[in-house]
Amino acid sequence: MGSVSDMPMPETVLTFLRKPNPAVMATVTSDGRPVSVATWYLIEDDGLLTLCMNDDRARLKHLQNNGQVSLTVLAAEDFGTHISVQGHVVSISPDEGLADIDRLSQHFLGKDYPARDRPLVTVHVEIDRWFGWSGGRPLQY
């Protein structure tokens, strides 16, 4: 089985999402255009996605105006294998002390986030639907 699903993610999918794989997020502008950008993310134990961004980024404005977001996570060793999720923003808050961006940076780079001079925000996203693809076919789980 492997189609767009609103069922809970199996452990194999969660394991994939917990790896520091490359990811691209998409948001929607106020005039309806889709916009995508590479990003870091974490999937939390409660299933929420954590994203961080500068507080002056266009993507933050998009998320504040239209809380819909899509994230595609690509297998680092095989871009044909990916998990895509669709979700909605449940919270946006200041990243006090840069604690969340440091968690992301540790996950992806193995060290704290180097740019300490800009205010950042943390965005939490609840996953509504997801889809997996591998080997030219829907992901089998």
Image (cartoon, rainbow, N blue to C red):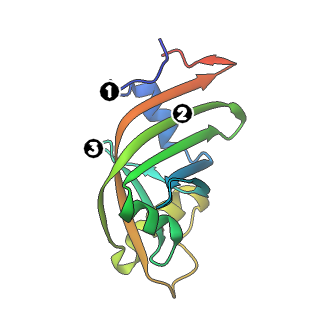
Determine the secondary structure under disc 3.
Answer: loop
Q: Are marks 3 and 2 in contact (CB under 8 Å)?
A: no
Q: Nearer the viewer, residue 81 or 127?
A: 127
The residue indicated by pointer 2 is 83
Residue at the outermost top position: 1
Q: Indicate left or right for 36 with 12 as reference.
A: right
Residue at screen point 57% across, 81% down: 115
Q: Where is residue 81, by image quadrant?
A: top right
x, y percent for residue 5: 40, 24
Question: Label 1: few (<14), some or many (≥20) within 10 Å?
Answer: few
Q: Nearer the viewer, residue 133 or 102?
A: 133
Amino acid marked by disc 3: Asp
Q: Is residue 109 above or below residue 7?
A: below
Residue at screen point 50% across, 59% down: 31
Amino acid marked by disc 1: Pro
Question: Label 2: few (<14), some or many (≥20) within 10 Å?
Answer: many
